[in-house]
Image (cartoon, rainbow, N blue to C red):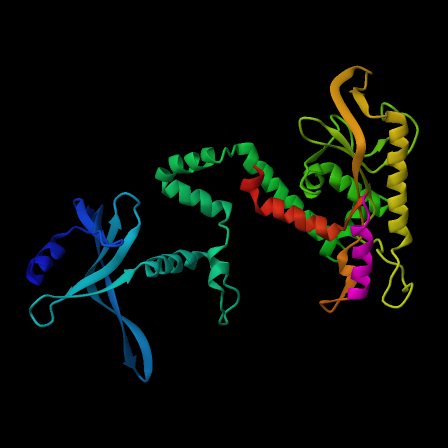
Amino acid sequence: MTEAEEYKIFVNKQTDKIYLSKSIDDVTETVPGKESIETIRQIRYISNVGESDQQEHIKLNDEIVLRSTPKARQEIIAKFYEDSRNLVSLQIQKFSTDSGNPHKTYFTFIGDEIWKLYSFIRNIPLIPIKGSEKQQFQENDINNIVLSKKHILQFIYEQPEIIPELIEELQKHKIKREDIIGLAHRKSQLEEFRSMLYVEGYFEGLKENSKIDKDELVWQKFFEKNTWILGYGLNYIFNSELDGKKLEQVTNGYDFKGSGKRVDLLMKTKGMINSLCFGEIKTHKTSLLKNSSYRSECWSVSDEVIGGVAQIQRTIQKSLENIRTKTEMKDNNGDLTGEQLYLYQPKSFLLVGSLSQFTADDKVNEDKFSSFELFRRNLVNPEIITFDELYERTKHIVNNPIEDI
């Protein structure tokens, strides 16, 4: 086809229509060894013509300005595979008739260039513009910006054809409405966890507003609302609260209701057989080591840590005496619920302090850290977990929702 013929087709195309070519064989030949194998895939061309004011830079009074000229016509043509819809090339073309004869001018995007152009255009509404000065952005940061609810709803409203695909994708991963709501809740509680640990004055304000006199009780209340944090954060064994019971329980008694030792967290492992799990909570401010070294390069763990370990070990020992190996749970009326819990060397953990105590100016005090780390690594029960470690595990849960759902 001559350029004159192409030009005639070009000018006769309507700007309100999208043109799709017929299916065309695309033959790819490969030569593994000495045998030639032909692979045939179907390709198509899709195009759209548009008219707009043509803009050009000109010099005016020693300044470079952008000038609009009368309407010009140009065409976007995309070549893609019919089966996968993957783009092969994207071409933008127009015809020049300055010389009297139509002459085609164009430039083409291929492969990753297409997606770079797409991302560049898509990201313009997402760029967080602040002030009037110059700014620079990391491309990945812009690509990862989450659209607001308003933008998402507007996008779906303008493109309703994607709704079946969206539903299919959700069903593929077995994601339900309550899963999405649950994930949103977890994100908000993760932010609450972060603020309690790292935002100056936030924890104290929360304690004052809640009219709670002890730091431990502030955390107790938070974990009562978010048992999933403790559930997924401990050696990747899922724990949950006892059916119909709070985390804090009296354990010196068969029914967990009599007088005796209170444990901050009494949970159960989840599986075909449920076992008891004990936990003690201190605070993120609790010292992990004593204020002075025991010997050169050797630090003793704090009395709070030693006390917490002894406390939970004693609680377990008393529970073994009273509960034996199995207990059947009762409701508030004394009726058996059918829930059975087993107690064979139960799992336990102590939640205390923060590893930030071993850093200064982003440098780790290895003497202090190694003293603490060696102590807890050689302790069989309970497992000692710091608040910042639990936060990082929680962040992993929230940031990998598909694995969790």
Which quarter of the picture shows residue 342? top right
In the rendered picture of this protein, how many numbered marks are placed on residues?
A: 0
Task: State the residue lying farthest toward the front.
Answer: 34
Q: Residue furthest bottom?
A: 62
Judge whether 307 appears above or below 7 on screen.
Answer: above
Report the magenta stretch's main SS.
helix
Compared across the picture, whether 387 is left or right of 101 comes to right
Could one spot residue 153 in this view of the protein?
Answer: yes
Residue 331 in picture, x, y percent from top left: 79, 19
Where residue 309 sits, quadrant-wise, is top right
Q: Is residue 376 magenta?
A: yes
Residue 71 position in % (x across, y down): 20, 63
Residue 347 in the image: above or below residue 44: above
Magenta stretch: give its range: 366-380
Q: Is residue 93 magenta?
A: no
- Horizontal side of residue 377 vs 322, given as left or right: left
Q: 332 left or right of 84?
A: right
Q: Quadrant of the N terminus?
A: bottom left
Q: Position of residue 165 (x, y in %)?
A: 39, 37
Please state the horizontal and vertical placement of residue 294, each as a whole percent of the image.
Answer: 91, 63
Residue under the image location 43 percent in, 56 percent down: 125
In the rendered view, tell whether residue 89 sits above or below residue 174: below
Q: Nearer the viewer, residue 74 or 392?
A: 392
Pick the residue in front: 186 or 308: 308
Could you say which is closer to the camera, residue 88 or residue 299?
A: 299
Residue at 71% over, 48% down: 390
Quadrant showing the C terminus: top right
Q: Nearer the viewer, residue 158 or 7?
A: 7
> Does residue 210 appear anywhere in the picture?
no
Question: Residue 299 appears in which quarter of the rendering?
Answer: bottom right
